[in-house]
Amino acid sequence: MKLETYLRFAKIPYMNAHGVQKSKKGKYPWIEYNGQELSDTEFIIEFLNETFKIDLDEKFSAKERGAARAFKKMLEENTFWAVTLDRWLYDSKSSGFRLIGVPAWFIYFLRRNVKNTTYAHGIGRHSQEEVYHILDRDLHSLSDFIGTNKFLLGDEPCQEDCAVFGQLSQIYWHAFGNKCNTYLKKYDNLCDYCERMKARFWQDWDQCITKGMTQKATK
């Protein structure tokens, strides 16, 4: 969501290739540009900005850019793990795994991997209540920062809106009925933000979620 929203924002034509092949770093997503493989959304976006001389944040000050990056990092390096626990470990029905077709016998091993990974990260050492408290505090801070803004920094989106939307969209539309969705819905401005980003960059949203793919950036 982060990368594809950026591509649409930057008006860079692209073609999706859905599959299970990982990048050389073992990460998703990754791109191939003129035969060159690049992985990790942050490095991909930096590469494309440099290659096509793009600056989506030229209208914002250094202070605003710094604040936007800080919130992006909070969501990607902290909130993300709370959502991961909620989606893959706390859900006793394993709704997420079953939705993507993971065999019942294999779910145990995947849940164990999530448990070990989040424990190593640190957030998995907390109780469920504490993890949800962390999630709520993150969302509360983001809600306070956005306030009445249409986007993260004001009336127009910045580059980091792609990452913020990428994380929030997973809670807003893809929570599989888990508890994290109830925390997001406490903050009307964050829900409105999700709908606004969708309307701005994903006019073909309904087609994408029913067809399972998108072909190229909107013109």
Image: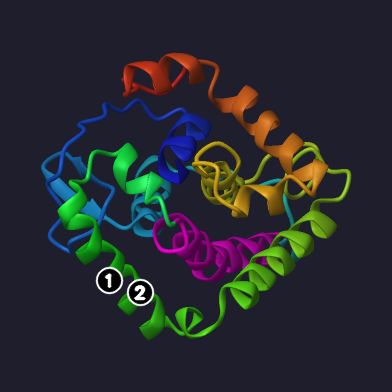
Q: Is residue 219 visible?
A: no
Q: How far across and down, in percent of the image, does residue 50 sit?
A: 39, 50
Q: Percent x, y for residue 160?
A: 59, 52
Q: CA distance from mark 2 to mark 1?
A: 5 Å
Residue holding disc 1: 112
Residue 68 lies in magenta, yes or no? yes
Q: Residue at x 33, y 38 (%)?
A: 99
> Is 190 on the left or on the right of 21, as rendered?
right
Q: Residue furthest right?
A: 148
Task: Read off the magenta span.
Answer: 64-91
Determine the residue positioned at 66% across, 37% down.
Answer: 194
Question: Is residue 48 highlighted in magenta?
Answer: no
Q: Secondary structure at mark 1?
A: helix
- In the displayed structure, would residue 202 be above or below residue 173? above
Please report the residue visible at 75 percent of the width from the left and 66 percent of the height from the top.
63
Q: Nearer the viewer, residue 93 or 157?
A: 93
Q: Which residue is mark 2?
A: 115
Q: Nearer the viewer, residue 219 or 123?
A: 123
Residue depicted at 27% across the width and 71% down the height: 112
The amino acid pointed to by label 2 is Lys
Q: Amino acid at mark 1?
A: Arg
State the mark number for residue 180: none
